[in-house]
Image: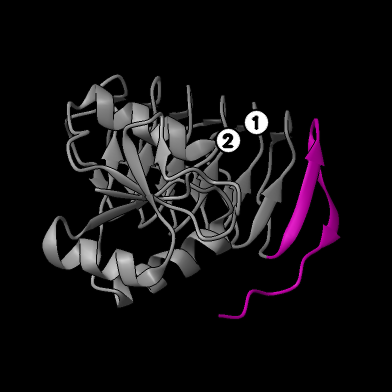
Amino acid sequence: MLIVGAKGFAKEVLEVLHQLNETEDVVFYDDVNKDAPDFLYGKFPILKNKEAVSDYFKTVDKRFTIGIGNPVLRKKIAYQFEQLGGIFTSTVSPLAQIGHFGNTIGAGCNIMTGAVITNDVKIGNGVLINLNCTVGHDSSLGDFVEMSPGVHISGNCKVGAYSNIGTNATILPKVNIGENVIIGAGSVVTKDVPDNCLVVGVPAIIKKELPKLIF
């Protein structure tokens, strides 16, 4: 598998692959950091151009996942690497607890160690559920939602696509979050939030409107 990115979160994705005993033929991709070594941990090659990626997909493994945060950036990366012939693939830690009834997980999700997902949870494509997050029953997460570590989403909640929930934030039951919403770290969201805004606080209130996303 190819992991897009070679720093920060990409190293945590590698740990999930190690937990799954799937590190054979793992490579990373980094064309941004000029100081990136040729191998991460002296073992895993770091590809540095799209030609090398295309060759890897053709000759080794078509699967890729994203080791970078930021919902919009993840969306753009997914499109770029699919155009190169890759298959957007989820990485789910065996140390996450996922219910056995009614759950769906889209392509390219990263579900990390300690996450708890109960039942009847719908997870879109490219969603990042970070360390020690919880998602309650009958909730849904739109495409490329990012949950930072320690986020708690209660039952019967809906989170719109491209929303980013800060560390240790909590969303109370039956709350709907719009698309392209940023929720500040530690916030407690007690009521519905419209599209394209930043909310912060306990209880969370709208601090400013955000530009609509255009792809």
Quadrant housing the C terminus: bottom right
Which residue is pictured at 25% across the width and 52% down the height? 89
Residue 11 visible in the current orientation? yes
Residue at 17% over, 26% down: 21
The residue range painted magenta reads 196-215
In this picture, residue 62 sits left or right of residue 5? left
Q: For this rendering, which residue is in front, 74 or 175?
A: 74
209 in magenta:
yes
Q: Where residue 38 sits: x, y (%)? A: 42, 45
Q: Based on the displayed image, in which of its 4 quarters is residue 169 positioned?
A: top right
Report the amino acid beneath label 2: Ser
- Give percent across and percent down for residue 155: 45, 34
Q: Which residue does the image show at 25% across and 66% down from the upper left?
A: 86
State which quadrant residue 59 falls in.
bottom left
Mark 1: amino acid: Thr
**Residue under circle 2?**
148
The picture places residue 149, in percent across and down from the top left corner, at 56, 28
Residue marked by disc 1: 167
